[in-house]
Image (cartoon, rainbow, N blue to C red):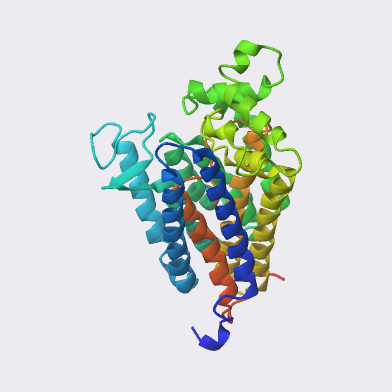
């Protein structure tokens, strides 16, 4: 690639992607630290998250400095490797592979390399975006709904494999991201609407299907029954959502700060540093802090769309759109479940929740979008997604 076609080392679009991610990571670390204040073992989880953040920033540099077109040429290989790892995880259900693969809470999601654990589904998000962008880059989607079969197959494979781990939360990310990328690639609104209606009609059948376990069905019922006046139910199935809403409301305008963290120090909210970190941040920093978190995601999404809009390369445009879309979908689902708007799916808040694989995957996503903003090759093909008869 011609160096003259590159923007500065990190253009303003790259900063607009990286800065909100760092802000969210910092708030997450402070939220984790608040829950460990006064702990006899010290801030062990906080220090681990800082180490994970350092690894995630290295992943950001690796993806950002790499040529996204080179990654695009290897997209199917990367996708195939990740799919093979997901299949390996499912095979471990029948073929013992301990200590490399062993269940945690009856789920097969991690591959252990000594002290390092890799959650393959987090890498699957990046591989999926790359593969779908490579597939759609020059395809004409407007003529027939049949042309959407290929992208849907690419989407269905990781969705089914991740769902079988089981990991319902991550599995739910692929299809909405595919819809956004299909729209960006020029698919007709009518075709996408037909698909959306079909999925809505099929949702009740999925609820009763073998893919849904009983504990996942109970989480759907929690949302529907959250306002009922039954103290016994709120102390059992509805406990986690009830505590989350108490944490959200008790922060008021400016929050309790780091000195009044008894709510989390005494573990009154299960999974406070993972799935419910948004409730922690709302309790600590109040409504103002919650708005700052939402604004960070909005800034990130706008920067990703800007990176896509200035690129003339179809692969770059789709990769940037998909990379930020999968993060925003995850953020919306996570915040929705902490507020009782969506079922609790075990999905973490991007950049803020505890976890190494998730941080690395999320920073790799924004690095992909930032790389598109930095490299703007001149394409000799027609403008991205233009119809051949225009």
Q: Quarter of the image holding residue 385?
A: bottom right
Q: Residue 136: x, y in percent?
A: 55, 61
Q: Residue 109: x, y in percent?
A: 38, 40
**Residue pictured at 49% horizontal, 40% vertical:** 36
Q: Which quadrant is home to the C terminus?
A: bottom right
Q: Residue 386: x, y in percent?
A: 67, 69
Q: Residue furthest right?
A: 253
Left or right: 138, with 115 as reference point: right
Examine the rendered structure and indicate whether residue 337 appears above or below residue 177.
above
Residue 385 in view (yes/no): no
Number of on-image labels = 0
Which of the pair 233/264 is nearer the observer? 264
**Residue pictured at 53% horizontal, 49% vertical:** 29
**Residue pictured at 54% horizontal, 36% vertical:** 272
Residue 156 in view (yes/no): yes
Which of the pair 96/23 is nearer the observer? 23
Which of the pair 44/118 is nearer the observer? 44
Q: Residue 332: x, y in percent?
A: 65, 44
């Amino acid at each position: 690639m011609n160096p003259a076609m590159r923007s500065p080392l990190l253009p303003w679009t790259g900063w607009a992607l990286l800065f909100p991610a760092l802000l969210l990571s910092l708030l997450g670390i402070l939220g984790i630290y608040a829950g460990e204040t006064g702990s006899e073992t010290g801030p062990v989880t906080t220090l681990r998250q800082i180490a994970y953040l350092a690894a995630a920033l290295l992943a950001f540099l690796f993806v950002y400095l790499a040529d996204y077109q080179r990654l695009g040429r290897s997209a199917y290989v990367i996708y195939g490797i990740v799919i093979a790892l997901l299949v390996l995880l499912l095979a471990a259900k029948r073929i013992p592979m301990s200590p490399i693969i062993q269940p945690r809470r009856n789920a097969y999601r991690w591959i252990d390399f000594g002290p390092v654990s890799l959650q393959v589904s987090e890498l699957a998000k990046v591989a999926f975006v790359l593969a779908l962008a490579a597939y759609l880059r020059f395809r004409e989607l407007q003529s027939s709904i049949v042309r959407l079969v290929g992208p849907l197959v690419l989407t269905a494979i990781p969705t089914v494999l991740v769902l079988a781990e089981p990991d319902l939360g991550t599995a739910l990310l692929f299809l909405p991201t595919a819809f956004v990328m299909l729209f960006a690639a020029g698919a007709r609104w009518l075709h996408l609407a037909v698909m959306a209606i079909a999925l809505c009609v099929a949702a009740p059948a999925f609820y009763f299907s073998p893919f849904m376990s009983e504990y996942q069905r109970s989480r759907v019922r929690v949302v529907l029954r959250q306002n009922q006046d039954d103290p016994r139910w709120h102390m059992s199935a509805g406990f986690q959502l009830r505590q989350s809403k108490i944490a959200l409301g008790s922060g008021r305008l400016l929050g309790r700060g780091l000195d009044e963290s008894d709510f989390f120090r005494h573990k009154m909210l299960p999974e406070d540093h993972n799935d419910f970190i948004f409730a922690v941040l709302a309790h600590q920093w109040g409504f103002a802090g919650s708005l700052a978190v939402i604004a960070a995601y909005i800034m990130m999404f706008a920067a990703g769309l800007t990176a896509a809009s200035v690129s003339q390369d179809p692969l770059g445009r789709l990769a940037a759109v998909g990379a930020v879309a999968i993060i925003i979908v995850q953020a919306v689902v996570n915040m929705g479940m902490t507020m009782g708007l969506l079922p609790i799916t075990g999905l973490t808040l991007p950049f803020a929740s505890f976890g190494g694989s998730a941080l690395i995957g999320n920073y790799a996503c924004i690095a992909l979008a930032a790389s598109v903003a930095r490299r703007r090759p001149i394409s000799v093909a027609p403008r991205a997604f233009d119809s051949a008869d225009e």
